[in-house]
Image: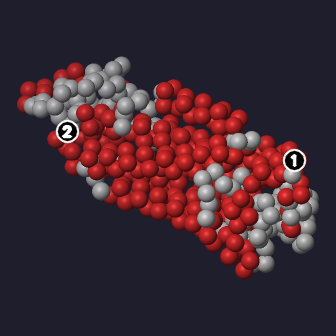
């Protein structure tokens, strides 16, 4: 049973648990007699503090390091890089900057994770301690960015603005400075913080998806993402020692956790895409009233488009493309007729549309 702020059961019972690198260095400097068994020799010691089962450092006792997790991280790096590219292409979607930041932070943690829990560096070395502290700070930042994604989705804060990402930079600096020496602060940062962030994120997204958008399909994505993340933690903490002993200290549960966490991030991307795609608003056709005269005839600069509050929050140029093409008449005469017969039932909101998105009028 793990007590609040108690890392001893985790460092001895969970193979390849990276935060234990910080405590190993402290014990090595101030209480070396505490280190027993496999942890006695820093050159060959596995990740952890007096672990019940652990993968020895590469080159010792025939160890090839935590090769399974290295492979899982390598594949995850490629997949997340693709997600970053796909996210970048959706220039019109709400929350693009914040989700891309989330993906990039997770992408950065993967190669660092290879170093911090793959038994590549000697235990207690300065390089390993520094990289572990950076890893801890990035993990905390990851969940602050996750929370920022939910806040931006509510449109309380403008997406892509400094207000939506600045707090993350502050939290990274604070936590990276504090996590090295204060055990309780590390426990709060790496467990309490991300647990709270996940709960708040799910609560906000549930409100947005079910109440604001009145949709159910995206909610299944969010629930699946949360379930995959929980399974990843269970695989690491509960199956890690079992797999380690069954494989004769060759692999442990960390590679399963990495695969499931990456899958969770991928499903989260699908959830975000599902609430920002144009198909989601096809059922809201009444929300897009007919264009006014200026919208029909103006070919350069700012163009006017009428939308309701929902579409203005969750739609941008990318999804209005099809709408413009279907609404703009092919001739000034038909445009005038359309404007005369138009009935505007929703408040008008002006959205700048690039002139290149306007179709050319058909030749007379």
| Residue 351 seen in this snapshot | yes
Comparing 124 with 77, the one in front is 124
Label 2 sits on residue: 287
Helix or strand or loop: what does disc 2 sit on? helix
Q: Horizontal placement of 51 versus 310: left or right?
A: right
Q: Residue at x 64, y 42 (%)?
A: 185
| Residue 93 seen in this snapshot | no
Query: Label 1 crowding class (10 Å Cα cut-off): few <14, some 14-19, many 20+?
Result: few
Q: Position of residue 327 (x, y in %)?
A: 22, 37
Comparing 20 with 69, the one in front is 20
Q: Position of residue 204 (x, y in %)?
A: 37, 45
Residues under labels 2 and 1: Cα distance?
A: 68 Å
Of the numbered discs in the image, which one, if any, rests on residue 30? 1
Q: Residue at x 82, y 47 (%)?
A: 26
Q: Residue at x 28, y 50 (%)?
A: 210
Give the colouring mode of the picture.
secondary structure
Q: Horizontal placement of 26 versus 268: left or right?
A: right
Query: Label 2 crowding class (10 Å Cα cut-off): few <14, some 14-19, many 20+?
Result: some
Q: How many numbered marks, from 0 up?
A: 2
Q: Position of residue 254 (x, y in %)?
A: 67, 64
Q: Horizontal placement of 186 versus 271: left or right?
A: right
Position of 116 relative to 290 (above/below): below
Q: Nearer the viewer, mark 2 or mark 1?
A: 1
Comparing 134 with 105, the one in front is 134
Question: Which quarter of the rendered picture does the C terminus lie within?
Answer: top left
Q: Residue at x 44, y 32 (%)?
A: 159
In the rendered image, the residue lying farthest to the bottom is 246
Circle nearer the N terminus (2, 1) = 1
Question: Which quarter of the rendered picture does the N terminus lie within?
Answer: bottom right
Helix or strand or loop: what does disc 1 sit on? helix
């Amino acid at each position: 049973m793990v007590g609040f702020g108690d890392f001893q059961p985790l460092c001895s019972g969970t193979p390849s648990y990276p935060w234990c690198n910080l405590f190993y260095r402290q014990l090595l400097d101030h209480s070396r007699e505490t280190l027993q068994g496999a942890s006695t020799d820093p050159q060959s010691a596995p990740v952890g503090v007096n672990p019940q089962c652990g993968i020895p450092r590469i080159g010792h006792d025939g160890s090839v390091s935590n090769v399974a997790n290295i492979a899982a991280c390598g594949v995850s790096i490629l997949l997340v890089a693709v997600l970053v590219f796909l996210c970048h292409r959706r220039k019109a979607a709400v929350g693009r900057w914040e989700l891309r930041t989330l993906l990039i932070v997770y992408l950065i943690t993967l190669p660092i994770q290879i170093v911090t829990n793959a038994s590549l560096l000697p235990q207690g070395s300065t390089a390993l301690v520094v990289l572990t502290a950076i890893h801890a700070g990035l993990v905390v930042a990851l969940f602050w960015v996750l929370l920022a994604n939910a806040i931006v989705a509510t449109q309380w804060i403008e997406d892509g603005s400094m207000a939506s990402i600045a707090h993350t930079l502050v939290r990274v600096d604070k936590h990276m400075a504090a996590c090295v020496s204060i055990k309780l602060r590390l426990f709060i940062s790496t467990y309490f913080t991300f647990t709270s962030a996940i709960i708040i994120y799910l609560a906000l997204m549930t409100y947005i998806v079910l109440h604001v958008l009145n949709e159910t399909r995206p909610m299944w994505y969010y629930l699946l993402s949360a379930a995959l993340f929980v399974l990843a933690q269970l695989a690491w903490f509960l199956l890690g020692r079992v797999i380690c002993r069954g494989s004769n200290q060759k692999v442990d549960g960390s590679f399963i956790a990495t695969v499931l966490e990456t899958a969770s991030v991928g499903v989260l991307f699908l959830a975000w895409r599902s609430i920002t795609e144009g198909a989601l608003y096809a059922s809201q056709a009444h929300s897009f009233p007919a264009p006014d005269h200026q919208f029909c005839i103006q070919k350069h600069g700012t163009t006017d488009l009428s939308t309701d509050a929902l579409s203005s929050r969750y739609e941008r140029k990318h999804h209005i493309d099809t709408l413009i093409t279907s609404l703009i008449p092919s001739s000034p005469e038909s445009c005038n007729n359309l404007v005369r017969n138009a009935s505007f039932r929703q408040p008008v909101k002006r959205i700048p549309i690039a002139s290149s998105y306007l179709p050319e009028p058909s030749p007379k």
